[in-house]
């Protein structure tokens, strides 16, 4: 500026004024730059400290300081922190249910194993009064344990994402008829009536063995929780959201907590845990509905439960065949 002013043949007075203006403007610009620079460096240090604390504690609260760009970074970090916390809570819940499962399964295995040992010892010592009854009991206990191990294996395949489905068109009516036919002797023995029906020609694309397991588990649960002379209804129909299969029983209704946790691994109701010692209805370890949910979700479907007087209704929703 000084060079240019010199070249402009300005008067000495004007030249001095210009010089002063330039000096003052320069000083003001320097001060403003320094102020903005200091503030920026302070804000970015604060953000750096907060990010460091986030790394240490896993918690981040978005501070409202600095220019918009820094605030945007800070808000993004706060969002990440919230997602991290949610996934940590989910992990903790999973860990809890895994721990619960191991505890319950060891409990449910230890009890029949103790019984088996006592029975085989009695047989060995020749003090069993009715050996054939002992043999039958041993057989049914072994069957129940085999079912439990089988359920655990299925559940571990589901959780590991190793469930290989061989999808094919399945006639839902045939599948439900088979499930009802195999559950019929148990229902008769309990005095429970089995009814319902499936829409003519209703088809789903599914793994028939896995879907049979779903229907079998739901029907067995329904029979187990329905008093004698009660009715269990299995209905299949096509709805707006695909194919719907419902199993309605006469269990007398479920509490909010039972409905929320019924599909959790090892959950057996808010009442005292009373495993089914006969083993007729499954392993009796609270795995049946967790397996149902795993299989249904692997088919891109959903499963839910609602109260429906005089009992409750388990509803499986599967996508309609393309
Ligand atoms: N149809 C039903 N009516 C009422 N309660 C039910 C019904 N089905 C399940 N429940 C409740 O949900 C719990 C979990 O059911 P789930 O099938 O997972 O386990 P389980 O039947 O106890 O054992 P498993 O199926 O492993 O033999 C049951 O213990 C019961 O309390
Ligand atoms: Mg069950």
Image: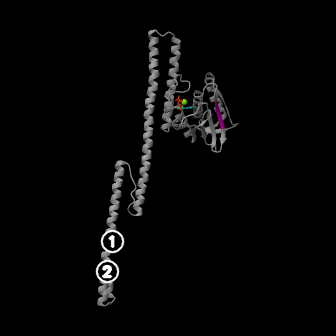
Q: Position of residue 68 (x, y in %)?
A: 42, 63
Region of the chain picked out in magenta, as a range: 232-236
In terms of depth relative to the viewer, which is nearer, 24 or 270?
A: 270
Quarter of the rendered image showing ligand 2: top right
Q: Is residue 210 above or below residue 88?
A: above
State the quadrant of the C terminus: top right
**At 45% from the left edge and 32% from the top edge, which residue is drawn?**
101
Q: Is residue 250 visible?
A: yes
Residue 235 highlighted magenta (yes or no): yes
Rate crowding at label 2 as few (under 14), some (14 to 19) or many (20 or more) other CA atoms within 10 Å. some
Q: Colour scheme used in the picture?
A: one colour
Q: Is residue 69 above or below residue 30?
A: above
Q: Position of residue 179 (x, y in %)?
A: 62, 29
Which image quadrant is residue 243 in?
Answer: top right
In terms of depth relative to the viewer, which is nearer, 68 or 6?
A: 68
**Is the shortest distance between ligand 1 and the CB of mark 1 under 8 Å?**
no
Give the left or right position of residue 74, taking residue 248 as reference: left
Secondary structure character of the magenta stretch overall: strand
Q: Marks 2 and 1, Cα distance to the nearest angstrom?
A: 15 Å
In terms of depth relative to the viewer, which is nearer, 223 or 102?
A: 223
**At 34% from the left edge and 88% from the top edge, which residue is drawn?**
8
């Amino acid at each position: 500026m000084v060079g240019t002013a010199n070249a402009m043949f300005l008067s000495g007075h004007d030249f001095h004024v210009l010089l002063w203006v330039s000096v003052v403007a320069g000083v003001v610009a320097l001060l403003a730059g320094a102020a903005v620079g200091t503030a920026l460096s302070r804000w970015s240090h604060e953000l750096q400290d907060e990010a460091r604390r986030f790394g240490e504690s896993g918690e981040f609260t978005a501070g409202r300081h600095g220019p918009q760009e820094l605030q945007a970074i800070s808000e993004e970090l706060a969002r990440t922190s919230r997602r991290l916390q949610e996934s940590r809570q989910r992990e903790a819940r999973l860990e809890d249910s895994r721990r619960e499962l191991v505890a319950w399964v060891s409990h449910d295995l230890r009890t029949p194993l103790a019984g088996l040992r006592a029975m085989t010892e009695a047989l060995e010592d020749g003090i069993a009064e009715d050996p054939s009854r002992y043999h039958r009991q041993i057989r049914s206990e072994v069957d129940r344990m085999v079912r439990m191990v089988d359920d655990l294996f299925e559940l571990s395949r589901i959780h590991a994402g190793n469930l290989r489905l061989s999808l094919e068109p399945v006639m839902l009516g045939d599948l439900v008829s088979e499930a009802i036919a195999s559950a019929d002797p148990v229902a008769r023995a309990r005095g429970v009536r089995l009814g319902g029906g499936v829409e003519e020609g209703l088809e789903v694309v599914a793994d028939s063995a896995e879907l049979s397991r779903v229907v079998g588990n739901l029907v067995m649960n329904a029979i187990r929780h329905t008093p004698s002379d009660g009715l269990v209804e299995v209905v299949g129909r096509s709805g707006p959201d695909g194919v719907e299969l419902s199993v309605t029983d006469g269990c007398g209704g479920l509490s909010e907590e039972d409905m929320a946790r019924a599909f959790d691994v090892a959950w057996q109701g808010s009442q005292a845990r009373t495993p089914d010692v006969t083993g007729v209805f499954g392993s009796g370890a609270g795995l049946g509905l967790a397996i149902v949910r795993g299989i249904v979700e692997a088919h891109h479907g959903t499963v839910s439960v609602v109260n429906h007087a005089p009992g409750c209704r388990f509803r499986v929703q599967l996508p309609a065949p393309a």
